[in-house]
Image (tube, rainbow, N blue to C red):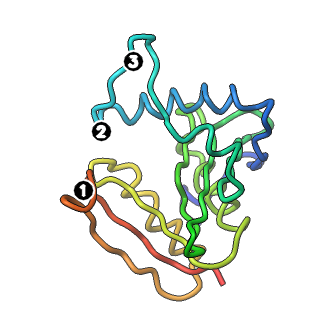
Amino acid sequence: MSRSDVVEGEVQLVPVREEDKSVLANLLQLYRYDFSTIRGYELTGHGTYVYRYLDAYFLEPTRSAFLIRHEGELAGFVMIRTRPDGVHEMAELFVVRLHRRRGVGRAAARRAFATRSGRWEVSFDTANTEAAAFWPGVVEGVAVGPVEPQQKGPPEHVYEGTVLRLSTE
């Protein structure tokens, strides 16, 4: 077992309820801040970052959000979307810096994949070197059958990146 497979403490996914929306919104600010160096996100005039899909996670039954708790402490979030074609997308996964490099993200991702069986897609930007190192191993660990990687980029996609297609059943 490698160091990245060792989880220090219990990791839980807790469904985000309407009353937790502000918690998720606050964590999304940290997430967008981390991505600002990769995607060039600018602050609004109010000193915040925009995440235009937040409300959709409380209005659309095809979207789910979970808070990640590590040893009971808030450690991040996972957001999943199911497309009309039935493919589940790992829309977002974020672990705050204090809880990184402890296997928390890997454990949270595995638990997220376990919430739905079937076909999945995970996308990450080429410029996000942490995600490029993280996702292939996680996906290989949960996939039933082969993982199909595909490069994406302009003009179809705004950012250069990789899509990993897999099945969990």
Coordinates of residue 87 in the picture (x, y in percent)? 56, 72
The reply to whether the C-beta atoms of the residues labelled 2 and 1 are less than 8 Å apart is: no
Q: CA distance from mark 2 to mark 1?
A: 11 Å
Residue visible at 53% across and 65% down in the picture? 138
User: Label 2: which residue?
Assistant: 39
Q: Residue at x 33, y 53 (%)?
A: 125
- Other-residue count near label 2 (Cα within 10 Å), few / some / many at <14 / 14–19 / ≥20: some
Front: mark 2 or 3? 3
How far across and down, in percent of the image, does residue 20 sit?
76, 31
The answer for how far apart the CA atoms under marks 3 and 1 are is 25 Å
Residue type, mark 2 in image? Arg
For label 2, the SS is helix
Dot 3 or dot 1: first in sequence order is 3
Tag 1 or tag 2, which sits nearer the N-term?
Answer: 2
Number of the label disc, if any, that sits on residue 160:
1
Query: Residue at label 3?
Result: 44
Position of 140 compared to 111: left or right? Answer: left
Q: Is residue 15 above or below residue 96?
A: below
